[in-house]
Image: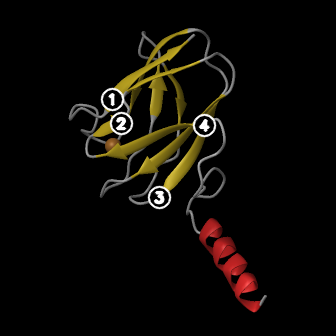
């Protein structure tokens, strides 16, 4: 019983140290789209989801900070995640996208130019 209590306390500590607060989490939310970020790519880079709220589970498996920004075909930024530190994860929820094809990219300097981008199709 004592061991169980200690294990629970450890989980609470881990959950509390995402840094940045709010959307950080260590477990993938049910129904979310998992995206792994490294230098310099999103994996997978071709995403699709139905209209409505889309939940992305961003995992930074790289060695520097990354984020995920969504822009439309005119270049307008529609949503941006928090900056995710190396080794951290972030739950990024977007509920404003209408059907269409969007570009996702990391807006850290030079990252998109190095290939850190992809497509998001909302159907
Ligand atoms: Cu990046």
* Quadrant holding the C terminus: top right
Q: Can you tell which mark lies on residue 29?
A: none
User: Nearer the viewer's eye, disc 1 or disc 4?
Assistant: 4
Whole-number angstrom distance, CA of label 2 to CA of label 1? 6 Å
Which residue is disc 1 drawn over? 117
Whole-number angstrom distance, CA of label 1 to CA of label 4? 19 Å
Q: Are marks 3 and 2 in contact (CB under 8 Å)?
A: no
Which residue is disc 2 drawn over? 42
Q: Secondary structure at mark 2?
A: strand
N-terminal-most mark, 3 or 4? 4
Which residue is disc 4 drawn over? 32
N-terminal-most mark, 1 or 4? 4
Ligand 1 is within 8 Å of the C-beta of the residue at disc 4: no
Q: Quadrant of residue 2?
A: bottom right
Residue 121 in the image: x percent, y percent? 49, 15
N-terminal-most mark, 2 or 4? 4
């Amino acid at each position: 019983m004592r061991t169980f209590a200690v294990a629970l306390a450890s989980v609470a500590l881990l959950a509390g140290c995402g840094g940045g607060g709010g959307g950080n989490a260590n477990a993938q939310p049910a129904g979310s789209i998992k995206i792994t970020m490294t230098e310099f790519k999103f994996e997978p880079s071709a995403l699709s989801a139905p209209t409505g709220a889309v939940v992305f589970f961003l995992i930074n498996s790289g060695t520097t900070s990354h984020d995920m920004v969504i822009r439309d075909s005119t270049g307008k930024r529609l949503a941006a995640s928090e900056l995710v530190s190396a080794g951290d994860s972030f739950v990024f929820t977007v509920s404003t996208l209408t059907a269409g094809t969007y570009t996702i990219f990391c807006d850290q300097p030079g990252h998109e130019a190095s290939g850190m981008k992809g497509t998001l199709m909302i159907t």
